[in-house]
Amino acid sequence: MGETEEANSRRADIAMRNRRRTLESRERKLTMAVFGLMAYSAFANVVSGAMLLTTSSLDAGLGLILGALYSLGAYRIWFKDDIRWWPVAVPAGISVAVLILAWLGGVQHPIPLLLNTVLLVLVPIRRRAVAAVPNISFKADGSAAA
């Protein structure tokens, strides 16, 4: 291989690594955003469910169940790196439905509605970001696996 071919090969490798780093950074930012919103929602629902135990068992049960679903979703996203739709969309969809029903009943909570809508929008965006990252694993000897 000539010097120019070798230089071009190195440039192509550097460009591929830079592109991969950029895509991984984007995927990591989206994962952090989804995880942060899920963890916040899990904490808020568990705390509100615990506080409502003495006044309304139905509201407390809903809060604790939603908190458990959000916790499961946060766990699946952070530790299992799950890109499936259901760990995020199920609790967010239930919350959006309940918040819309409450809104129609005269109780407005715009911030939780906005946060859960953002979660629902981030699901397909994160999935595309994960799919865009090339799946290249490196073995111990340094050769790339096909």
Image (cartoon, grey):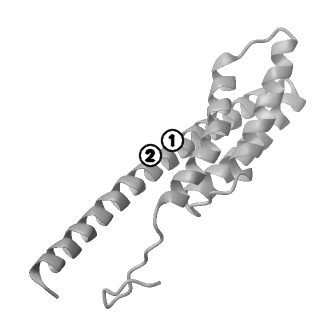
Q: Quadrant of the N terminus?
A: bottom left
The residue at 60%/41% (across/down) is: 122
Is mark 1 in CB contact (under 8 Å) with mark 2? Answer: yes
**Among the 4 quarters of the image, the one containing residue 45:** top right
What residue does disc 1 label?
33
Q: Residues within 10 Å of mark 2 (few under 14, many from 20)?
A: few
Q: Position of residue 72 (x, y in %)?
A: 69, 53
Amino acid at circle 2: Lys
Decide if residue 15 is on the left or right side of residue 3. Answer: right
**Among the 4 quarters of the image, the one containing residue 65:** top right
Which residue sits furthest bottom? 141
**Which of 29 and 79 lies nearest the eye of the viewer?**
29
Which residue sits furthest top? 106
Distance in Å between CA atoms under marks 1 and 2: 6 Å
The residue at 12%/85% (across/down) is: 2
Amino acid at circle 1: Ala
Mark 2 secondary-structure assignment: helix
What residue does disc 2 label?
29
Which residue sits furthest left? 3
| Vertical order, 109 against 118 (above or below) | above
